[in-house]
């Protein structure tokens, strides 16, 4: 009898811990946001700068890096020039060519006396060879894994860090969608090499990247990284206003969701969205549809047949009907997996970072996004978007309505799980 009681208690604890992984945060947006002002109205920045946390800072320079052939050399160059500190947080870090190059670069700087701190998501780095981690540690790199499989983490195993942050000397900062794996190398030249974009920022907002890294570093180690070597005085480096904000189920869980909803509600002319995982909830669908109905030109580019999750593709497509009827244009990128995460509104604001356009990113993952308020940068990103759009196939409402019965039936099983995709 005692043995049975113990087994029952253990199974109950395990069931509760597993159930906790599927719970979304208590704070949840449930009502639509009305269109009360345009994105160009000062009220928009005033509200976003307060609601999302970090203030919008002037004096930044943001440079886009296209595909691995530009992204990795720029990151490796910045690491090679580090004098005092490097902080690096990522979801995907696998072995392979670029994994070895990053490990070698970080190890070399640690041996030279640079303070190097690396935070890897435990799930995202499962394919990473232990010898790479051991090599960094032997060189003096402090490496930790975020929420490893331990008994005390069972209730939070589903909460992963999806952030991609690299900060060098507290001055040079990178974010975007790229992971440390070989499919991101090259120039998206074939289905084995993904399309992606990353960004380098110089200027005052770099301190917000460092603060974002500190957020999960403290959760993992209890150590606060501070002092001038991590947070130096930062002079203006350009003309762009920008801020980087974070979200996590532990705090600010609805920041990303709120940013998208406020931006869509404020749109007066255009919304261009590149979304590698586009699984919108009802509020987002309604917001986009209403924007389309009030005359906003909306173009959405998603992956086509080349996608690393057919389940995501099915869940995404199930929701397209109302948006297509509202005049929203949806395109499928054909050459390879399109991993971009870019939102451009009214050719005035650009939002980039690690955040996917889905419930998991809005409520379960730890994410970081950079908003840039600069018309010249927005114009450049619009040209990038339109260049990618040339490789996209327009998906019509008639095609959506005529999709196979088998696909529609599978969607019914997938949709209840979309918060976990």
Image (spheres, rainbow, N blue to C red):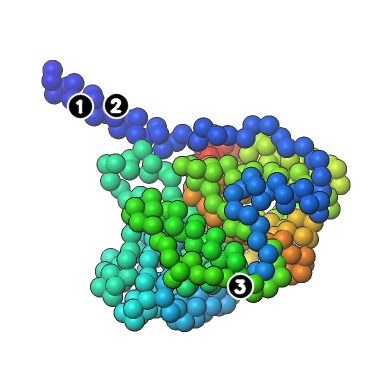
| Foreground pick, 392 / 421 | 421
Report how far apart the C-alphas of labels 3 and 2 lie in the structure. 56 Å
Dot 1 falls on a residue whose secondary structure is: helix
| Occupied quadrant, residue 99 | bottom left
- Assign the N terminus to one quadrant of the image: top left
Within 10 Å of disc 3 (Cα), the crowding (few <14, some 14-19, many 20+) is: few
Return the mark for residue 171: none
Density class for disc 1 (Cα within 10 Å; few <14, some 14-19, many ≥20) is few
Tag 3 near tag 1, CB within 8 Å = no
N-term-proximal mark, 3 vs 2: 2
Q: Secondary structure at mark 2?
A: helix
The residue drawn where x is 86% and y is 47% is: 295
Say the numbered circle drawn on residue 12: 2
Characterize the local packing of mark 2: few (<14), some (14-19) or many (20 or more) Cα atoms within 10 angstroms: few
Determine if residue 283 is in view. yes
Q: Would you place residue 419 above or below residue 375 in this image?
A: above
On screen, 282 above or below 132? above
Mark nearer the N terminus (2 vs 1) = 1
Q: Position of residue 304 (x, y in %)?
A: 63, 57
The answer to which of 146 and 110 lies nearer the viewer is 110
Which residue carries the number 3 mark? 235
Classify mark 3: helix, strand or loop.
Answer: loop
Which residue is farthest top?
Answer: 1
User: Would residue 339 appear left or right of 324 to someone viewing this image?
Assistant: left
Residue under the image location 75 percent in, 49 percent down: 44
Q: CA distance from mark 3 to mark 1?
A: 61 Å
- Looking at the image, which residue is at 49% across and 50% down? 366
């Amino acid at each position: 009898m005692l043995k049975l009681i113990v087994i029952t208690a253990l199974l109950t604890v395990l069931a509760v811990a597993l159930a906790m992984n599927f719970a979304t945060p208590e704070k949840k947006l449930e009502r639509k946001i009305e269109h009360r002002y345009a994105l160009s109205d000062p009220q928009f920045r005033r509200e976003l700068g307060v609601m999302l946390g970090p203030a919008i800072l002037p004096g930044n320079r943001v440079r886009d890096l296209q595909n691995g052939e530009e992204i990795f050399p720029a990151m490796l160059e910045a690491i090679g020039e580090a004098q005092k500190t490097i902080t690096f947080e990522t979801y995907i870090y696998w072995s392979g060519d670029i994994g070895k190059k990053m490990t070698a670069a970080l190890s070399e700087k640690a041996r030279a006396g640079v303070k190097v701190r690396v935070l890897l998501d435990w799930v995202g780095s499962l394919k990473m060879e232990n010898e790479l981690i051991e090599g960094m540690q032997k060189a003096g790199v402090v490496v930790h894994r975020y929420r490893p499989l331990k008994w005390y983490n069972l209730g939070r195993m589903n909460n992963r860090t999806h952030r991609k942050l690299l900060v060098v000397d507290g001055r040079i900062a990178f974010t975007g969608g790229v992971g440390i794996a070989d499919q991101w190398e090259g120039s998206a030249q074939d289905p084995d090499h993904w399309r992606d974009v990353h960004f380098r920022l110089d200027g005052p907002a770099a301190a917000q990247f460092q603060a974002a890294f500190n957020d999960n570093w403290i959760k993992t180690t209890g150590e606060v990284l501070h002092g001038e070597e991590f947070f130096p005085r930062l002079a203006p480096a350009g003309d762009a206003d920008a801020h980087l904000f974070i979200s996590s189920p532990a705090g600010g869980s609805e920041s990303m969701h709120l940013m998208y909803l406020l931006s869509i509600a404020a749109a007066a002319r255009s919304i261009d969205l590149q979304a590698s995982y586009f699984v919108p909830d009802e509020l987002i669908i309604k917001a986009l549809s209403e924007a389309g109905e009030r005359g906003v030109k909306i173009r959405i580019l998603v992956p086509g047949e080349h996608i690393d999750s057919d389940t995501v593709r099915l869940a995404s497509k199930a929701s397209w009907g109302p948006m297509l009827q509202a005049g929203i244009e949806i395109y499928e990128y054909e050459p390879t997996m399109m991993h971009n995460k870019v939102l451009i509104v009214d050719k005035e604001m650009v939002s980039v970072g690690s955040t996917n356009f889905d419930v998991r990113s809005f409520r379960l993952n730890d994410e970081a996004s950079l908003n840039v308020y600069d018309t010249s940068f927005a114009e450049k990103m619009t040209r990038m978007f339109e260049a990618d759009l040339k490789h996209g196939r327009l998906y019509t409402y008639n095609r959506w309505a005529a999709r196979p019965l088998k696909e529609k039936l599978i969607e019914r099983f997938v949709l209840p799980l979309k918060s976990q995709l």
